[in-house]
Image: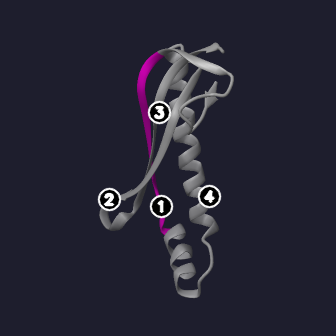
């Protein structure tokens, strides 16, 4: 399965557009992560804890996007866009959404 942010794949052309697909992942930041993240805000620096949570959410959204594409019989997902939002009370949850176009490819 080819997953790409580009509108096409070098050396291949789109045979069939199967449709736009999307997936969403929502992850809550727990109390300990909030404390550690708050300390980073006070003292500066990167928050490895939040970065790992963000990466986990992104990977989950991408896996789900790939699973949906496979179920449709796609060879690739083109034009993938990732969006990040905070939701919930006081922005306590992180939502990552991934969307793209599922396609069948043919050799060029």
- Which residue extends farthest bottom? 43
- Callout 1 secondary element: loop
User: Does residue 11 appear to the left or right of 87 in the view shown?
Assistant: right
The image's mark for residue 18 is none
- For the C terminus, the quadrant is top right
Sequence-first tag of 1 and 2:
1
For the residues marked 2 and 4, what is the alpha-carbon distance in whole angstroms? 20 Å
Return the disc, 3 or 4, that comes first in the chain's sequence. 4
Q: Nearer the viewer, mark 2 or mark 3?
A: 3
* Element carrying mark 2: loop
Q: Position of residue 5 (x, y in %)?
A: 56, 39
Picture layout, residue 24 above or below residue 13: below
* Residue that mark 4 sits on: 52
Q: Is residue 67 magenta?
A: no
Q: Kindly identify which residue carries mark 3.
A: 100
Quick check: 93 above or below 96?
below
The span picked out in magenta is 17-31
Q: Which residue is mark 2?
A: 88
In three-dimensional space, the C-alpha distance between marks 3 and 4, rounded to whole angstroms, equals: 24 Å
Residue labelled with disc 1: 29
Q: Residue 56, percent across and down?
A: 59, 49
Residue drawn at (39%, 63%) of the image:
92
């Amino acid at each position: 399965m080819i997953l790409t942010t580009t509108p096409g794949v070098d050396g291949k052309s789109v045979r069939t557009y199967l449709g736009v697909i999307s997936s969403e992942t929502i992850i809550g930041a727990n109390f300990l992560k909030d404390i550690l993240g708050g300390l980073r805000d006070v003292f500066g620096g990167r928050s490895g804890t939040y970065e790992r949570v963000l990466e986990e959410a992104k990977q989950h959204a991408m896996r789900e996007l790939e699973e949906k594409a496979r179920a449709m019989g796609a060879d690739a997902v083109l034009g993938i866009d990732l969006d990040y939002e905070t939701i919930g009370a006081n922005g306590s949850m992180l939502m990552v959404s991934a969307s793209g176009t599922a396609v069948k490819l043919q050799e060029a």
